Amino acid sequence: MGGNSRVIGGLAALMAAFSFALWNVYLQRGLARGAPARLALLPLALCEIACFLPVALILARRSALPPLAPRGVAWFFLAGVMTTVVGSCLATHATRLIGAAETTAIRLLDPFFAFAIAATFLHESIAPRALTGIAVLAVALLLLRGNARHAPAARRGRERPLGLGLAVATSLAFTVGSVIRKAGLLLVPSAIVAAACEGIAGTLVIAPIVVATVRRQGLADLTWARGRDLWLSGLAAAAGTFFLNIALQRVAVPVAVALRNLSPWFTLFLLPLLLGTQHRATRATWWSTGLLTAGMLLILSR
């Protein structure tokens, strides 16, 4: 790969980190203002379609797209189910229970799950640094678990362990989705096509569920006046998906993952700016985020 390509890939991964941080913060603000969690996924999927499908169609008309290998497109649709539907659903409920700061911090487990998948299915050896990184991740999670006394009353008790568990499951879902997306990009090297397919897949799954479970009056929460934060979160997530696809095309997966996983740090700074100073992260959250970052880097440097 050329130097310029690596620079573009690195910058794209950083933009993905910032975009996904915005997604979680806007999502938390929308949920705090009373937006139903079940409606949060539909704006995300529709934003992906609105942003990327028209561009893909224009490029196709100009014969500027790579050949659409059916297997690659199928990988994109499966990635859409894993990320836009499963991962985003888990992230939405985790954010509702424990907030954006801790939900995005736990996304730093992505390299651990990628490492575990590689070790299990590709029989990769476990280096001492990776084991040390796993131990550091465990300490960080225990620190988050012990942070319950600093959480608001609504996030204590049974809700907090559930929220942490959902955040861990979110990390696993997005990691699997990234592996699937990478497989698709190897066959159809187009970030635009990947994002458009993921949006279509998400809409095909989410829209019938929303129509069947939400009353007509509830759909009014999707108007811009009442659901602005949900739409802003959807736009931010769509941008993050696009930038991550660009990064995966231009740099090695570990590099893209490491840079994309700076998202929790962006979240810690964005929270008081967009939600008010009462949402500042606790000292324990800062420490746990630092430990999660250290564990991630140890795993990636094996």
Image: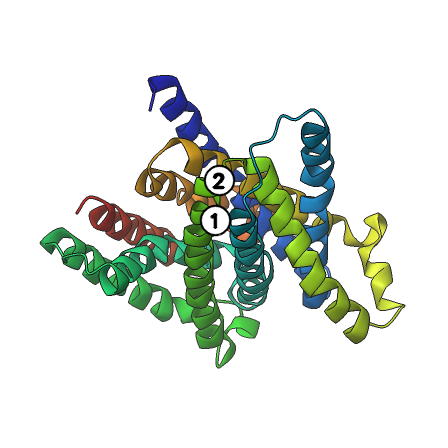
Residue 244 seen in render: yes
- Tag of residue 181: 1
Q: Is residue 40 visible?
A: no
Q: Amino acid at mark 1?
A: Arg
Quarter of the figure with the N terminus: top left
Q: Is mark 1 in CB contact (under 8 Å) with mark 2?
A: yes
Q: Nearer the viewer, residue 260 or 142?
A: 260
Tell me: residue 213, above or below residue 173. Answer: below
Residue to which mark 2 is pinned: 244
| Foreground of the two, 275 or 242 | 242
Disc 2 crowd rating (10 Å Cα; few below 14, some 14-19, many 20+) is many
User: Number of labelled discs?
Assistant: 2
Which label lies toward us, 1 or 2?
A: 1
Secondary element type, mark 2? helix
Q: Which mark is residue 123?
A: none
On screen, residue 8 versus residue 30, left or right, reads left
- Under circle 1, the secondary element is helix
Give neighbour class at mark 1: few <14, some 14-19, many 20+ (Cα, 10 Å).
many
Horizontal and vertical percent position of residue 269 = 49, 41
| Residue at mark 1 to residue at mark 2: CA–CA distance | 10 Å
Q: Residue at x 72, y 35 (%)?
A: 57
Residue 19, position as x, y percentages in the image? 55, 40
Which image quarter: residue 263? top left
